[in-house]
Amino acid sequence: MRTDQLLQYLEKHQGKEISKKEIERLTAKKDRRKGRLRGFFDVPDTDEVLEDLASLGLIKRERNSYLVRKPFLIEAKASMNPAGLIFAMPRLSAREKDKVRDLFIPPAKGAGALSGDIVAVRLVDRKKDRFEGEVISVVKRARRFHRFRVLTVGKDGMTPGVLLDMPGKFTSLINLKGLPADTRSRIKTDTVLIVELRGRNVRYQNAFFHEASFVRFEDETEFDLDFDRILLKYDLDPAYADLPFPAIDPDDQKQVPDWKKRKDLRKLYTITIDGADSKDFDDALSLEIVSKRKWRLYVHIADVSFYVQKGSPLDEEALSRSTSYYLANRVVPMLPPELSENLCSLVADHNRLAVTAEMEIDPATGRIKSSTFYRSIIRVDKRYTYDIAETRLDREDGPDADPILPGLWQLAQKQKADRMKMGRIDLEIAEPKFKFGPSDSVIAIETRARLRSSMLIEECMLSANTAVAAFLKKKKAPTLYRIHSTMDETKLETLNAFFDIYNIDCRLDDTDPASLQEALEIARAKGPLESRIFNMLLLRSFMQAQYSPEPVGHWGLGFEDYCHFTSPIRRYPDLVVHRSLVSLIEKKKPAYVDDEMDSLALQTSEKERHAMEAERDMWKLKLIRFIEQSGRTEFHGFLTGFRPDLVYLELEECPVEGIVPAMHLSSEGELVLPDPFSVYIKRLSRPAFLGERWKLELDRIDTEALRLYFKPVWGTEERALGRSQNQKNQGQNRRGPRDQSGQSNGNRNGRQNNRRRNDSRGSRDSRGPQSGGRQR
């Protein structure tokens, strides 16, 4: 039975139960014919199609029947490639998402959907292993406003233009007739406007355009243009509506209705350690040495759930944001500043409401022996920056000595050593540090040192996260866990090819974290270049961490039980965890039911990736401006990846990616990729390898595409490998493993999207430095 026929039949019977015998009867005749056709046509297996439809949630398998979902539609997130082709990824739970591929939408069936839109898709056929569909409706636009560059101003007022910050080229049309004359006179060819799409297509001069309306000129904003551009692209609102919440100040005991039910810890010495510019203090620490064999660690977390009531207008707004966005030196907060920077923030010398994880620790191993959780009142005695805390970790005597910092550092070292033995993978990824000038421009770049004080905080937060996750799992409370799937073993072939090409005596036979950590140590011993490349390759090989109602563990950290509990001011999943925990503490009805969790996991995971993309684009834009304003044209860069049409390099002088088009490397305009680690450079008559250092001349800057284009300066390149020409030729003939697209795994199609976010450096997030937010 053809897939299109099966889909039509199921759609006709949506909302009904169909017996397996009925499906078998309908497909029997076609299946007999299929045997004769195999070898001439790609005839899909009906059972395989039904299994994939079940993974998509369109049918539910019962014992002897299938229940067809009504409506027989899939909600998916649209994305577009530069050619304008639409692919839609079904919005599924974490446990189903890895089982399905994205859907292909033919150009004529897109219904005006744009990249990032949430769409309702009707399946119409299946080619090879991918379903094809048509967009029935746009459920939610990814953004409200768009940047629009004028192509020409028509005499009739009809003005076509191109939508910017979009993959591919999308044209739109605005009508200037209703605008004042002085406004119309300012609009010329190449003027950039802000427009709002009206949701329908119109025909003009034998072409179709997305109809839009004029909103304002691009430069009519109170923000700097780069920040405003990112706000528009990612549909972010830096302002917060005046939504009600309990404006209760804990400094006034009478205002707190549950004061007597909380544990009063104000006399317990408590500290915070944060960035110098931080304002939203989520966490604080206390330590008691009960005996030589028993220490008591307290991790106090801001009690955001007290102020943000589930289902309130403020809660709905917080969920829609799901996370704070750290855009260079600015923040778009998840919660209003009155909460995030004042009432919820654990500022020093003020009473604050908290949820405390109290853990008894074996100081010899750092392991948690027992834990208890409760609502509390704390009063932070000392606010440290990371830099100041760093100077006092070893200071046990003197006027600057802190009573608990040396003990916390000792405990953190024990915990990290134990967790490394238990299977944690510790990547070494350089982190830049930026200095900003008065006009929000980057004026200096340094490499951020990984301080011991930062590691101390990471280990303490990991302790609280694992303890809370284990407790919630034991009590079977509906909540969100932070999960990270095991690395795909097919990636091992690529990693082993790296060892072979770079003459490193190592081979990986499994994805056991201990084996990978040993490989990291071997690469580190080989040299800084090899270590840098292997860390980069390993990071790209990881699956992406996400939120899930299922406690399946965190592979990268080596934890069976893990959740995010420690940052409820800036992450909504942490707020969910707090509500689940508090309902158990107070022996109340569960804060959530199981049916709520899949949608919460999906929303928060998507928004986390959304924030990552926004933050990445903001940093790219700032760094491009930095290079543009410096006037510098000569750079050096290390090869980091290849495609048939270009190579990628990471600049030494600035932590940003550069591109050298194939036309500068080969007269044919296309490159040969022998394996995942090399590209044949025809102009040099030899292959170039990952890590090779080139001298570069800046060719042009494409601010719209966020790209820097370079020309190589030949004769100065430093090869990554000191191998003989014969060895290089052998490397040239080695074929690398291929991914599903047929491209070598070393290729860089969508390089940034292949970076797998994980929590392998404690509970740190990839927030931009000096963002004013927590660097975890």
Image (cartoon, helix red, strand yellow):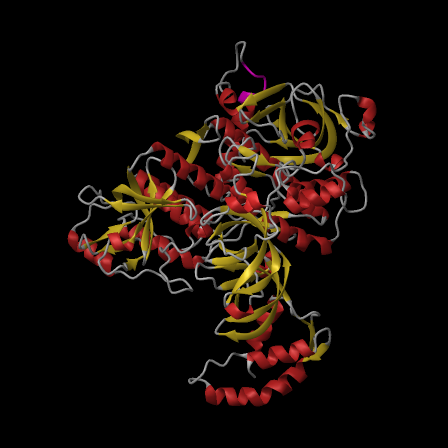
Stretch in magenta = 401-406
User: Quick one: 648 or 705, which is closer to the camera?
Assistant: 705
Place of residue 589 in the rendered image (x, y in percent of width and height, measured from the top left): 81, 46
- Which residue lies most toward the top here? 399
135 w.r.t. 125: above or below:
above
Q: Quadrant of the C terminus?
A: top right
Determine if residue 498 is in view. yes
Horizontal relation, residue 187 to residue 323: left or right = left
Q: Determine the image quadrant of residue 464.
A: top right
| Residue 702 colored in magenta in the image | no
Q: Determine the image quadrant of residue 750.
A: bottom left
Q: Residue at x 65, y 20 (%)?
A: 348
User: Quick one: 327 or 208, which is closer to the camera?
Assistant: 208
Place of residue 725 in the rendered image (x, y in percent of width and height, measured from the top left): 16, 52
Q: Determine the image quadrant of residue 264.
A: top right
| Residue 403 colored in magenta in the image | yes
Q: Residue at x 56, y 37 (%)?
A: 221
